[in-house]
Image (cartoon, rainbow, N blue to C red):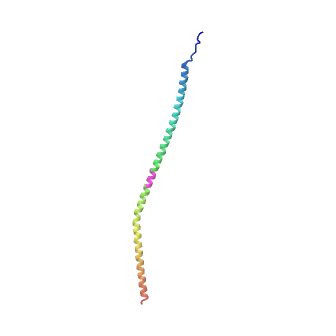
Amino acid sequence: MAKAKRVSKPRKKATRRKSAKNQNYLMAAMSDIGKELRRLTSGKKKLRARLDSSRRELLKLKAREDRARDRLTKLIAKEGPIHEGQRNLKRSITEIKNRILKVKKIREEIRDPE
């Protein structure tokens, strides 16, 4: 009895098919990674733009706050002399009222001598 010969499959073709499949998977993976990288880069640029915009807005707001604080300080400084003037006026009015009362008292004494 003669042994039957086995027919072997050509290995180069199978290797090439696997290699081509693997290369296709690698190319697809690289493409996906490239797309994701572009998406992330775009997101980073947008985020940086928003951050820069927010930073500018904060600086503007701080400048407005500083100007308002300066105006408030000036108003408080002006308030002191105004209060002093009010106190002087009240004191003068009180003195005038006291003098008027004295004059009325004297007038009544002159009209009604006892």
Q: Quadrant of residue 89?
A: bottom left
Pinpoint residue 114: horizontal percent, then vertical percent.
42, 90
Residue 64 belongs to magenta span: yes
Q: Image point 49% across, 45% down: which residue? A: 50
* Residue at the bottom extreme, as displayed: 114
Q: Is residue 20 above or below residue 56?
A: above
* Residue under the image location 42 percent in, 72 percent down: 90
| Image-quadrant location for residue 11 | top right
In which image quadrant can residue 110 be found? bottom left
Q: Nearer the viewer, residue 8 or 105?
A: 8
Magenta-span inclusion, residue 78: no
Q: Residue at x 44, y 52 (%)?
A: 62
Q: Magenta span covers which residues?
A: 59-65
**Residue 109 versus residue 40 in the image, above or below:** below
Q: Position of residue 14 (x, y in %)?
A: 55, 21
Q: Nearer the viewer, residue 6 or 102?
A: 6
Tell me if residue 31 comes above or below residue 106 in the rendering.
above
Q: Height in image: 28 above or below 75?
A: above
